[in-house]
């Protein structure tokens, strides 16, 4: 049986998160962005035609940080050099810095044996809605992934609190993903491959709205040509700046619900 104090804490937690979404939008100076360049160090990520995912994600994150800095946003990077950072540590950095948004940056790659590479943009949010996902959360917890920090020390309470926290952020996660996808395909004219849900460990620990964006296929000549060029890199970064700005400015407004209503998310 769950202790009454733990259940009360869970309700207060969710109440606080809900109230925060109704507050007036923060100014750029108040809105801290955490950028997560995927892979790094010995983890090369996807590879194609001499391009390494870990190199591109860092270049894009630094360019995005530069453009956001010009608009007075405080920005932190989960890595600012070619080094390996564990999946759990990435969100811990964002949590420690009290970021208002967490965006993980990646390049896509098709399954082995695919004859013709797909192309285009996909954006992901954390899937926490199925029984299978709940079981997987428990498996990860048992394997030592730090999914929740609770003073109770009770395994079941930790998982329940984590589930409640994740669920409370889902509308904001979806809105962030929708805006990132919309602005990326609008600016870069890449193919729209949809907004999807998946159990990405890198998103599990985020205590703020979060999404993972696959800004193109490293195996696609068209996508790779765009992303390798300085102009293309700046355009991709500019599109994500627009998404972050619109996310901030529509927080707590009727436009937030409108964005969600116009943006289907695949299961």
Image (cartoon, grey):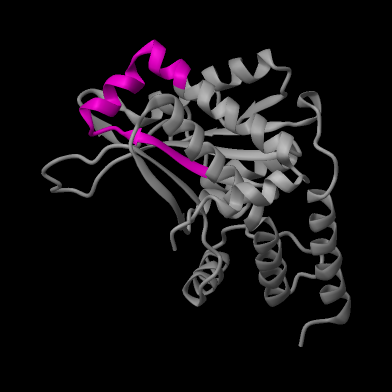
* Vertical arrangement, residue 6 with respect to residue 182, above or below: below
Q: Quadrant of the N terminus?
A: bottom right
- Give the mark count: 0
Quadrant hosting residue 100: top right
Q: Which residue lies most toward the left here?
A: 115
Residue 221: x and y in percent read 21, 27
Q: Would residue 60 be found to the left or right of residue 23 on screen?
A: left
Can residue 243 be seen here?
A: yes
Q: What residue lies at 66% left-to-right and 47% top-to-bottom? A: 209
Q: Which residues are magenta?
A: 212-235
Q: Would residue 265 be found to the left or right of residue 43 on screen?
A: right
- Front residue of 212/121: it is 121
- Front residue of 167/193: it is 193
Q: Would residue 24 be found to the left or right of residue 32 on screen?
A: right
Q: Is residue 216 magenta?
A: yes
Q: Would residue 154 be found to the left or right of residue 218 on screen?
A: right
Residue 237: x and y in percent read 51, 22
- Front residue of 249/112: it is 249
* Vertical arrangement, residue 14 with respect to residue 176, above or below: below
Residue 35: x and y in percent read 58, 32
Residue 207: x and y in percent read 70, 50
Q: Is residue 234 magenta?
A: yes
Can residue 89 be seen here?
A: no
Q: Quadrant of the C terminus?
A: bottom left
Q: What residue lies at 56% left-to-right and 71% top-to-bottom? A: 138
Q: What residue lies at 38% left-to-right and 34% top-to-bottom? A: 42
Q: What residue lies at 59% left-to-right and 27% top-to-bottom? A: 242
């Amino acid at each position: 049986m769950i202790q009454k104090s733990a259940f009360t804490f869970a309700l207060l937690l969710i109440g606080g998160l809900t109230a925060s979404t109704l507050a007036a939008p923060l100014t750029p100076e108040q809105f801290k962005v955490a950028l997560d360049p995927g892979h790094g160090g010995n983890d090369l990520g996807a590879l194609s035609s001499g391009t390494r995912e870990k190199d591109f994600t860092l270049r894009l994150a630094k360019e995005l940080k530069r453009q956001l800095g010009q608009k007075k946003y405080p920005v932190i990077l989960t890595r600012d050099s070619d080094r390996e950072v564990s999946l759990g540590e990435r969100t811990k950095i964002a949590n420690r810095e009290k970021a208002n948004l967490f965006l993980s940056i990646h390049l896509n790659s098709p399954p082995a044996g695919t004859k013709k590479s797909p192309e285009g943009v996909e954006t992901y949010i954390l899937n926490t809605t199925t029984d299978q996902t709940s079981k997987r959360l428990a498996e990860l917890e048992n394997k030592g992934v730090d999914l929740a920090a609770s003073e109770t020390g009770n395994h079941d309470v930790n998982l329940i609190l984590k589930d409640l926290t994740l669920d409370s952020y889902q509308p904001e996660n979806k809105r962030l993903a929708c805006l990132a996808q919309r602005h990326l395909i609008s600016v870069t004219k890449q193919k729209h491959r949809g907004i999807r849900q998946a159990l990405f460990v890198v998103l599990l620990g985020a205590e703020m709205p979060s999404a993972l964006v696959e800004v193109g296929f490293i195996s696609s000549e068209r996508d790779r040509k765009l992303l390798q060029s300085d102009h293309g890199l700046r355009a991709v970064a500019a599109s994500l700046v627009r998404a972050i700005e619109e996310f901030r400015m529509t927080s707590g407004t009727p436009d937030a619900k409108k964005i969600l209503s116009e943006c289907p998310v695949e299961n």
